[in-house]
Image (spheres, coloured by chain):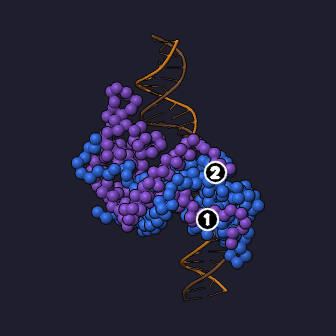
Chain colours: A blue, B purple, C orange, D brown
Amino acid sequence: MSNNEGFVLRLESFLPYRLVVAASLVSQATARTYATKYGIGIAEWRVIAQLGEFGTMTAKQIGARSHMHKTKVSRAVALLTKKKMLAKRANRDDKREAFLSLSPVGLEVYESIAPSAQALSQRMFGEVSSEDRAAFERVLDTVTARAAALADTGAELPD
Amino acid sequence: MSNNEGFVLRLESFLPYRLVVAASLVSQATARTYATKYGIGIAEWRVIAQLGEFGTMTAKQIGARSHMHKTKVSRAVALLTKKKMLAKRANRDDKREAFLSLSPVGLEVYESIAPSAQALSQRMFGEVSSEDRAAFERVLDTVTARAAALADTGAELPD
DNA sequence: GTAAACTAGTTACAAATGAAACCAATGTCA
DNA sequence: TGACATTGGTTTCATTTGTAACTAGTTTAC
């Protein structure tokens, strides 16, 4: 029984809530897999994925493309460097930054983990029809844009 | 340029990644709004939302329905109790648990925040067509189920 | 040329989080 | 009945996270 006569919010069908719950489960499942099979976390994996896709980037570029806070990137890079998965090359023209890329070891990890990630995704989204998948992507796009705007303008709610 | 000839994962179109990014932005926007306007966090809001919807629940029930870890529920309940937003009534039949419900203050908060939350959701999902929204919900459902299964079985990746 | 403003990245600190230990109460089963 | 396992909930502890301060390097404006 609900204890108020006015507006009642049904949380179970409230989209922002459902989205966040789904993402958190996906994230858990993913983290668990990467951790148990490769001994790295999601942040590290994202760095590897970016470098695997684009070859060479600065930490800043990685952060921008992967939507990660710069401290997170910094720590992920430090860890991956310690694990010899990354090569760091100084930029002669701007000594503040460095060019990062996958070392042979890192590349190996990437080549083994990327198809696995794809397979995991397949397990989660595999039985979705392609129409639904397309719609899903459209919605993700608009929501991402809207939420990003709301998140960093700190916009007030309408009354 | 990519630095490997084999399989390349395009992170920007990788669904689990996009889902998690979208959710994190939604979560940020939401948290910011609740925090600035009501001085509570997402966990606290979820507790309030559950109680607003269902009236009276134990901490355990709240955790189960809202997908929150029991320590998180415990802390949220403690905070809300300190803020006089919750009423706690002992269960005579099982003194380990207690029945929680919204106090008059808590109910006020709920009645003011629930429509705001709805409005915020509207801002994020408002321009989505109802077909896309339906598809989106279908996908969320299947993904939630699949990810939950993967997350707690600790299933291995296929090779 | 140089002082002030700015930027890439790291570090220090504080808050949030989850796993595990814990406490009190309840259930089980001999 | 009484030992043992289990459960609701809290607390402790170690880890993760983000904010803010900081360092080193670069750009801008005079």
Q: Is A97 positioned to the left or the right of B39 in the image?
A: right
Quadrant location of residue A74?
bottom right
Tag 2, which chain?
A
Q: From this viewpoint, which residue is outermost toward the left?
A: A5
Amino acid type of the residue that numbered disc 1 sits on in the rendered structure: Arg
Residue at 47% across / 43% down in the picture?
B69
| Residue A126 x %, y % | 55, 54
Tag 1, which chain?
B
Quadrant location of residue A111?
bottom right
| Residue C5 x %, y % | 53, 78
Above or below: residue B130 compared with residue D8: below
Q: Is B54 positioned to the left or the right of B141 in the image?
A: left
Mark 2 vs mark 1: in front: 1
Residue at 70% across / 78% down in the picture?
A93
Q: Is A84 positioned to the left or the right of A5 in the image?
A: right
Instruction: Out of A50 and B155, give the one closest to the viewer.
Output: B155
Instruction: Out of C16 and C28, give the one closest to the viewer.
Output: C28
Which numbered dot is residue A34?
Answer: 2
| Residue A46 x %, y % | 62, 60
Amino acid type of the residue that numbered disc 2 sits on in the rendered structure: Tyr
Which numbered dot is residue B10?
Answer: 1
Residue at 68% across / 62% down in the picture?
B7
